Structure formats: C-alpha cells, structure tokens
Amino acid sequence: MNWLIAIFQTMLFVLLAPLLAGWLKWCKCHLQNRKAPSLLQPYRDLLKLTHKQPVVSEQASWLFVTAPYIIFSATVLAASVVPLIAVDLPTSASADVIVMVGFFAFARFFLALAGLDIGTAFGGMGSSREMTISSLAEPAMLMAIFTLTMTASTTNLSGAIAHVLNEGLILRPSFVFALFALILVAIAETGRVPVDNPATHLELTMIHEAMILEYSGRHLALIEWASQLKLMLYGVLIANIFFPWGIAETFSAKALGYGLLAIIGKLALLAIFLAIAETLVAKMRLFRVQEYLSFAYLLGLLGMLSHIILEASR
Amino acid sequence: MNIEQTDFYTQAILSMAALVGLTSFLMLGQGRLLRLIFVFALQGLLLTLTTALAAYSLNNPHLYISAVLTLVLKVIFIPWMLRREVMLMNMHRNVQALKNKTAVMLGGASLMVFSYYVLHPIVQTTSPVMLNALAVSLSVVLLGMLLMISHRQAVAHVVGFMSIENGLFFAAIVATKGMPMVVELGVAFDVLVAAVLFGIFFLHIRTSIDSLDVDLLNRLNEVDK
C-alpha cells in the first residue's frame, strides 16, 4: 500500500511538472502585458516533440542518444525522494537528501557530457558554464539543507519535514537564512532569470539552452521535461521544508487529498513570486554569478552559524 | 535553554537580531550608494519592528513613541536626505567597486566571532538570549566601523555611522527593555542633528575637492608641490 502511494506520488510529480511550468509562463505573460499561452501548452509541446523524428548529428556518439534517458530517469529518482503530498513514504525512507543532491549531480554530469559530445562551440561553452555554476551552487544548497537537517537531527527529508511539522510554529533565525539561501540556489540551479534566461535561444549568455541546442524530437522532450521536473522539485523542497503545513501524515484518502491541494496552492503561490521576481530583475552578467552564489553560500553559512550560536542548547 | 522552550517574543527577537546582523553584512558588501542607503533603511525598518514588538509584549507604551521616531527618522527622513544628496551630486551612476571585498567580508565575519568571544563571560549572569542579542548588536557596531573604514565615499561613511547608532539602539531595546523616554528623545535628536551636520559637511567637502571620495583628501597639502 505504502509503495503504491509512493509510486503514485512520483507519477504525480512527473505529471504536474509541465503544469507548473505552464502556470509560471502564464503568470509571467500577464505581468508583462503579453497574451498568455494556455496552461496546457507545455503538455502539447512535449506531445508534439515526441511525435517528431529526432535528428542526430553524424558525429554524435552513443552518449548523446542515451543521455536524455539517463537525465530524465535520474531526475525522476530524485523526485521520488522528496515528499510531495505525504511524509513517511518508503521511497523517501530509503534515500536521504544527500542522495537527492547526488542524483542532481549525476544528471548534470551527463547533460554536460552530452553538450560536449557533439563538439559544437555552443555546447562546450554551455557545459563549462553549467559546471562552473553548479560547483558554486552545490555547497550553498548543501549548507542550507544541513541547517534543516541539524535542527531535525536527520538527513532524511521525510523525517526532517515531519520534525518541523510536529514542532509547531517556531520562529527560527536559521530557517530564515536557509530559506533565502535555498531560494537563491534554486533560481541558479533551475536556470531562471538573474542567472540564465530559459526563454531564449538567441543570446550568447545562455547556459542550459546552449547545452541542449543540438537535441530534437523525443530527446529534447525528455530533457525539457526533466528541467521542468527539476523546477518543481526545488519548488516542493522550499514549500515543504519551510512551510510543511498541510502535508499528509496518515495515508487516508482525505489527508492525501488535503496534501495535494496544499502543495498545489503553495506551488502556485511560489510560482507567482518567481514570476514577479523574473519580471522585476534583469539578467546578470555571467561573471557576476559567482558573487550571487557566494552570497547564497554566505546566507547558508549564516543559517548554520545562527543555528549553532543562537538556537543551540547551553 | 533550547529555542523550542522559549516564548514567541524571544524567538522573534532572535530572528530580528539575525536579520539586523544580515543587513549589516549586506551594507558591508554593497558598492552602489543607492542600494547601500536602501539596505540602511531596511535595517531601520527592522529596528522599528523590534521596538514595536518589545512595546507590545512588554506592555510598555512609550516604546511605541520611540518606534514611531525610529520609523520617521531612520526609515524615511535620513535615507531620503542621503538619497537626495546622492542624486544631486550625480553619484548614483558611479559604481564604486570595493577594493578588496573578500577581505572586508572575511574581516566582518571575524568581527562577529570576536564580539561573541568578548561577550561570552556575560552568559553566567544573564540569559543566553540576551547574550545573543547583545553580541549581534555589538557586531553591528563593529561592522559599521568596518564599513566606514572600507568605503571611500563620504555618504557611505555617514551610513556606517548611523548603523553604529542602530546597533546601540538595538542593544538598548533588547537589554534594558526600553530606555527612559528622555534618553531616547535625546538620542533621536542627536541623530537628526548629526544628519543635518553631515549634509553641511558634504557640501564643504564637495566645494573643496569637488568630489565626495575621501581618498582625494590625501592629496591636500599645506605647501604646493
């Protein structure tokens, strides 16, 4: 039974991810006085891409063709670790947050390799930029997550969320810092506006799009889907770690339904904030990204320090 | 004592202390003047919130007056005045990159540790919450000084000076549960007078060296070379 719910939750993750991307685009379009595409547009795009024949360069090795499948499945595995509508599921019990970060790193490694594989200038450039950014973002993210796990004294996400949930409303200075750090890292890792612009193929500053420029057809669909999934994953992490109220603790249909409604509401709200931020903020120069990420790291570190200094028992 | 066992007021004060400390760090790393002034106003707002919180939970109505004073002076008036000066002198386009930002930030972090170290003996006589809040306010004072040392623009020096005052004010609210009204009024007007005096200083520095970059003052000589 528990496994069924776990599988259902992961399916939900995978199916809802394009909807979140569509909602984000919808909000952004309305904020910028543009006519918005339908909320279902990302699904249509994915469907259309799967029908098209993928075009693969003659120079491509086997890696280029297998990379999309590896990336997608690694991201789905990472999604199965994160509690979406219920805590205490067997999938999240079997792997902790460090494994999740490991899955991300695994997917990114193959994405960067695929970008390099074709040997175009853009692919290599995108890969090198992606690796630079991720090497700076990962410590900041782990720092923010460790603040949480030190409070809950477990690295298991599900256990940590249950801990926050059962503790009730406690204002922790360390969580404020960790929240800001995680938001900054999430923006950098999912390639949103101040760091990378997901909506363009025309700039020399692109990062994620540069790597996947050579992909087409179902390969492109899988990679796009994986990046939508990653966006949702970060959204769920932020929503469920810091505002876990509403998530199901028992496996009754009613609790699960409430959990689903709660997470959809939280994600919709987060997406609105993200859309506002993307509308207000201009894209950063590439060489300022390290300042941005070191600020995220500083926040994470301050969160950790204030956990140790301000909150620890004496 | 764990944070779970403290009351909501203490948790809120601790969070405020952490955020005030963060704004000090933000000011330290800020090269642009307008943003520096904005963060300064943000710190003033946090102070206002802390004061109002203290007034509410300690049931001490005269603290509301000091919250309003803080709001008017440190969130609205002084930032507005500084902003106007910057705009008038056309310095807002001037991105003054800090010379050695990393070293300054690291220095700031070590100052924070230092203030904990200095205040640690107090833990025997008072509650740990007090120690934390006092340490943060001491580090805000020290970071303000560091800001004055590391930045070159005179406007940044004024912001540093005012943030030193913010640190003292925070300590006063948290530690004494509100100073006597006379003292608060006196300090508030001191700050006001200081702000006006600084405005006049800006004018004089600018007419004498045609810039607000204080490094240029080194070039002034008694004798012509």
Image (cartoon, coloured by chain):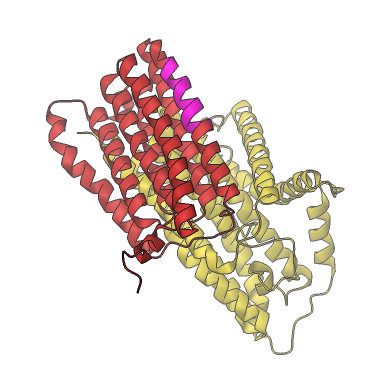
- Which colour denotes chain A? yellow
Magenta span contains residue B26: no
Q: Main secondary structure of the magenta part?
A: helix
Residue B70 in picture, x, y percent from top left: 45, 26
Magenta residues, start to end: B64-76
Q: Most extreme residue toward the bottom, as rendered?
A: A59
In-front residue for pair B211/A231: B211
Q: Quadrant of residue B221?
A: bottom left
Q: Is residue A309 above or below residue A211?
A: above
Residue A26 in picture, x, y percent from top left: 78, 46
Q: Most extreme residue toward the front, as rendered?
A: B223
- Which colour denotes chain B? red
Whether residue A311 sits left or right of residue B206 in the image: it is left
Residue A18 in picture, x, y percent from top left: 73, 51
Residue at 26%, 33% in the rendered image: B134
**Can the viewer see residue A36?**
yes
In-front residue for pair A112/B190: B190
Residue B222 in picture, x, y percent from top left: 31, 64
